[in-house]
Amino acid sequence: METYESLLAAVSVPEGQPVIDPATGEAFAHAPVSTTADLERAIAAAQAAQPAWAALSDDERRAALTAAADEIEANAEALALIIAREQGKPLSGPGARFEVGAVVGWLRATVATQLEPEVVVDDEQAKATIYYRPIGLVGAIGPWNWPAMIATWQFAPALRMGNAVVMKPSEFTPLSVLATALLVNRHLPEGLFTVLAGDRELGEAISSNPAFGKVTFTGSARTGAAIMRASADNLTRLTLELGGNDPGIVLPDVDPKAIAEGLFWGAFINTGQTCAALKRLYVHEDVYDDVVRELAAVAGAMPMGPGSDEQNVLGPLTTEQQFGIVDRLVEDAKARGGRVLVGGEPDRDAPGWFYPATLVDGLDDDADLVKEEQFGPALPILKYSDVDDAIERANRGEAGLGASVWSADPARAREVASRIQSGSVWINSHGTIHPMAPFGGVKGSGYGLEFGVEGLKAMGVPQVIHG
Ligand code: NAD
């Protein structure tokens, strides 16, 4: 069984890219820096390994992925400690141990999901059936917010469908992904799945390389567009899971106390650094004061500190840049007359990138904190009196990843949900993804689906056999 020390030693190097502990702002390890020559070697190894992997039976591939899930489970604490140290999320609550649980959960769900051939025509004249064949080599590029979990969303379905994978994690969180791959690779053929740590140049080299039949990307909209441009000449298939600016709409029939904790975690999970977190909250005027009071009580009571400390449930922001973005948005909100209800005063001289859980109201919809993705612990709360108006405001902007509706009447909530332009809408929760329910964005949040049967289809190429 790996310890934190043994796993860290296996994936870090004495000299390389410094990896920062966001709770201190100091480097705690060094990650390898892969070159384009490493990429060429990884592509060659993947291309050599993939045909035999694709030729295995589906059950054999499922058995390998099950063994990988068991391996992660057996070494869960060591991996959680690396995630907590590198990304900053606390071990406890919906934090680093939860993330490792999701790695295992998504691996097992990927194994459990069955993609059957689909008979689409079957009459006296014709028969046609859709099969999904391996793509070959899949490139995967990931973000820093849920590094191990999102890496699993990418590699698990790709492998299950008979592909090889070359993956590049974020330069801010390479060790979590290298450690995940090290454990998974104990049960896979040599060369089939390689993680290469590197920065955006390596990402560009992957996106523009014709060896990849597909690139799956999770990250910002700007980078998603750059990947489209870089891959256009190769007609590379893409899944683009991009940023969100998820609205929540609270209808007047809610019990404010009952929903406060759900609202809090919807917005502040992973200290707000979650693609489908609640990022602007529209509350009906009849319940406005009560919802704000209850939410402020929850937000003010949540302990924040280093991820390694068991009592914390909120950690630092992962990067200095992200701290700067949140700080700028909240200062701008204050300058526009926004009222800070909780938080809003970070200790800028303290070590690490800690920004307190912050609630702001009194803003117009054109405030940057409302319009932009804050990707951090600062939630704007906005009042509405007419639900049609709230829906129109919720649909403003480029993003269309997630949304939520909060109501005691599920039918009414579903009707409101149907009018929101987003890939997912949750009722009385936010961001509660499920490994069997497809997940993906619309509008500027990208396209393509992950998870479940749709997620497997996205990692194959359809072939229709007539007859
Ligand atoms: P980012 O776009 O800056 O970086 C993501 C990855 O892309 C990194 O590995 C980076 O090295 C690489 N990269 C950067 N430039 C590149 C280029 N030109 N070509 C190829 N690769 C390149 O995003 P981030 O800051 O790491 O992540 C935060 C963003 O990700 C937020 O907008 C968040 O909402 C979004 N996100 C979306 C989802 C989702 O499922 N939709 C999930 C998590 C995060």
Image (spheres, helix red, strand yellow):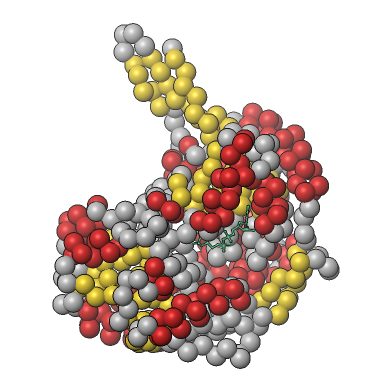
Residue 333 in sight from this viewpoint: yes
The residue shown at (67%, 36%) is 210
Image region (quadrant) for ligand 1? bottom right
In which quadrant of the rendered view does residue 256 lie? Answer: bottom left
The residue shown at (66%, 80%) is 25
In which quadrant of the rendered view does residue 143 lie? Answer: bottom right
From this view, report whether residue 188 is shown above or below residue 275.
above
The residue shown at (53%, 31%) is 461
Residue 160 in sight from this viewpoint: no
> In this rendering, would 262 be left or right of 9?
left
The residue shown at (47%, 65%) is 274
Q: Position of residue 353 (x, y in %)?
A: 58, 81
> In this rendering, would 18 be left or right of 293?
right
From this view, report whether residue 105 is shown above or below residue 406.
above
Q: Hey, which residue is sitting farthest right in the picture?
A: 14
Q: Nearer the viewer, residue 85 or 171?
A: 171
Q: Quadrant of the C terminus?
A: top left
Q: Quadrant of the N terminus?
A: bottom right
From this view, report whether residue 407 is shown above or below residue 34.
below
> In this rendering, would 344 be left or right of 12?
left
Q: Position of residue 253 (x, y in %)?
A: 16, 70
